[in-house]
Image (cartoon, rainbow, N blue to C red):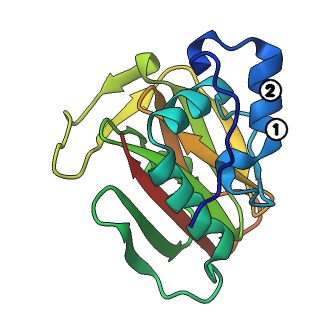
Amino acid sequence: MSCSCNYNESATPEKWSKEKLDKWFESGIWKCNWKISPDESVNRRSVAVYYMKNKKMWDKAFYFLKNADLVNMSPGRYKIDGDRVFVNIDEYNPRDEINTRFEAHRQYIDVQYIVYGEEKIGITDINNMADLTGYNRANDVVFSEASQYKYRLATPESFFIFFPEDAHRPSVKTDAAGKVRKVVVKIRI
């Protein structure tokens, strides 16, 4: 399985010009040319940096998203590459904002995709978090509240990527009541 092609990597992504970064990002090679678009909140430079550090795991993650039967797979956890790349599929009813918290991860990058339904996801920089629970290493999560954030609508038309510097508040209900089916691919850093 190979998704990427030989892209001219004359410099590390940290040093790429905005034009070079945009061209690479929009080419879609990093997402195995999966037809679903990343949400506009996704940090393009972070995608390039983390992708170039570990292309094989990213290719496995997006190969799965592109080719798996996401509608009919049973909810649960699926290993793609042991504990380095795995998938959680869940179905649930989104909750009121008061019943959700921000979360952040240190060991894994989250790729979140709504297969059907919709929810709001709060997004903020980790520096805007007030640590409520302390970091749980076993579950790779810290829960918190945040003073500054914005909400994005998560639908089947786009996906989200959350890096360690991104705090996110998933599973917030919208005015459209109904069940959500979500796929979360975890890519080890």
**Residue occupied by mark 2:** 22
Question: Vertical placement of 125 versus 54: above or below?
Answer: above
Is label 2 in a helix, a strand or a loop? helix
Can residue 101 be spotted in the picture? Answer: yes
Q: Quadrant of the N terminus?
A: bottom right
Q: Residues within 10 Å of mark 1 (few under 14, many from 20)?
A: some
- Which residue is painted at 54% across and 87% down in the image? 73
Q: Quadrant of residue 178?
A: bottom right
Labels 1 and 2 touching (C-beta < 8 A):
yes
Give residue 126's quadrant in the image: top left
User: Picture coordinates of residue 185 (x, y %)?
Assistant: 48, 59
For the C terminus, the quadrant is: top left
Q: Position of residue 89 (x, y in %)?
A: 48, 73
Give the left or right position of residue 87, taking residue 178 as reference: left
Residue at image location 67% in from the left, 29% down from the top: 44
Query: Residues under labels 1 and 2: Cα distance?
Result: 6 Å
